[in-house]
């Protein structure tokens, strides 16, 4: 159980550990970047406009196994530490600003996201970055080379940061698998440059 309200949220130093993958892809990982993140999670679990979606898959339409919220460029984010995180990430990586914030709410272990790359828009042909800050119950982010192969597991806990860069969206896939373990809610906040989804 999270002890809400104990400490005001703040960002630690951006001292990431880089993991070089294949084909020009890399991942930066930083556990505990957002300190005192309980208040951020409390805000994100509130009424911020979460919506359920349905998608066509094979011969039918299925429920997306998570709730979604999209914040366009210029839209006010639901907690000031998220705005600060986006600005700090932009300043640190410097190539192009992070502008949008997509959010996924994994309500329990049955919620997941299948293997995919964020290859809509410019990321289908250019190197791009996607920065993810995780809040709530730990869940692993899995990565594997495009089309299959041995996977790499990054455990993402409360306040952790992971940045996928270089060719990662084109040459690797990532997923958050279902789990039969009893887990609480987790919110994934994905910061992206314009034209990347």
Image (spheres, grey):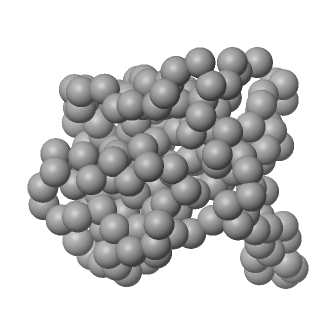
Please say whether residue 186 is visible from this viewpoint: no
Look at 67% across and 25% down and name the residue there: 4
Q: How far from the left and from the top, in percent, is residue 192?
A: 37, 63
Look at 67% across and 61% down and name the residue there: 48
Q: Is residue 124 left or right of residue 134?
A: left
Q: How far from the left and from the top, in percent, is residue 21?
A: 27, 39
Q: Nearer the viewer, residue 145 or 50?
A: 50
Look at 12% across and 55% down and name the residue there: 94
Q: Within the image, what quadrant is residue 18 found in?
A: top left
Q: How many marks?
A: 0
Relative vertical location of residue 169 with respect to residue 74 in this rendering, above or below: above
Q: Within the image, what quadrant is residue 97 found in?
A: bottom left
> Quadrant location of the N terminus?
top right
Q: Nearer the viewer, residue 78 or 180?
A: 78
Q: Nearer the viewer, residue 172 or 52?
A: 52
Relative vertical location of residue 39 with respect to residue 145 in this rendering, above or below: above
Q: Is residue 16 left or right of residue 58?
A: left
Q: How far from the left and from the top, in percent, is residue 44?
A: 64, 48
Look at 53% across and 30% down and name the residue there: 37
Relative vertical location of residue 4 with respect to residue 176 in this rendering, above or below: above
Q: Is residue 160 left or right of residue 66?
A: left
> Quadrant location of the C terminus?
bottom left
Q: Nearer the viewer, residue 98 or 122?
A: 98
Please say whether residue 125 is visible from this viewpoint: yes
Q: How far from the left and from the top, in percent, is residue 153?
A: 49, 30
């Amino acid at each position: 159980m999270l002890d809400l309200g104990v400490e005001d949220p703040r960002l630690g130093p951006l001292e990431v550990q880089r993991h070089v993958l294949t084909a020009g892809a890399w991942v930066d990982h930083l556990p505990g970047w957002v300190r005192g993140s309980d208040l951020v999670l409390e805000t994100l679990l509130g009424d911020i406009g979460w919506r359920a979606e349905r998608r066509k898959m094979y011969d039918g339409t299925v429920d997306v196994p998570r709730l979604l919220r999209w914040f366009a460029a210029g839209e006010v984010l639901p907690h000031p530490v998220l705005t600060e995180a986006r600005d700090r990430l932009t300043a640190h990586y410097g190539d192009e600003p992070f502008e949008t914030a997509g959010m996924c709410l994994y309500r329990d272990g049955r919620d997941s996201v299948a293997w995919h790359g964020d290859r809509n828009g410019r990321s289908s042909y250019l190197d791009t970055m996607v920065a993810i800050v995780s809040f709530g119950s730990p869940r692993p982010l899995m990565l594997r080379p495009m089309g299959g192969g041995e996977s790499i597991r990054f455990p993402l806990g409360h306040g952790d940061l992971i940045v996928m860069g270089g060719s990662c969206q084109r040459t690797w896939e990532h997923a958050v698998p279902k789990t039969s373990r009893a887990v609480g809610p987790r919110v994934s906040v994905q910061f992206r440059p314009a034209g990347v989804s």
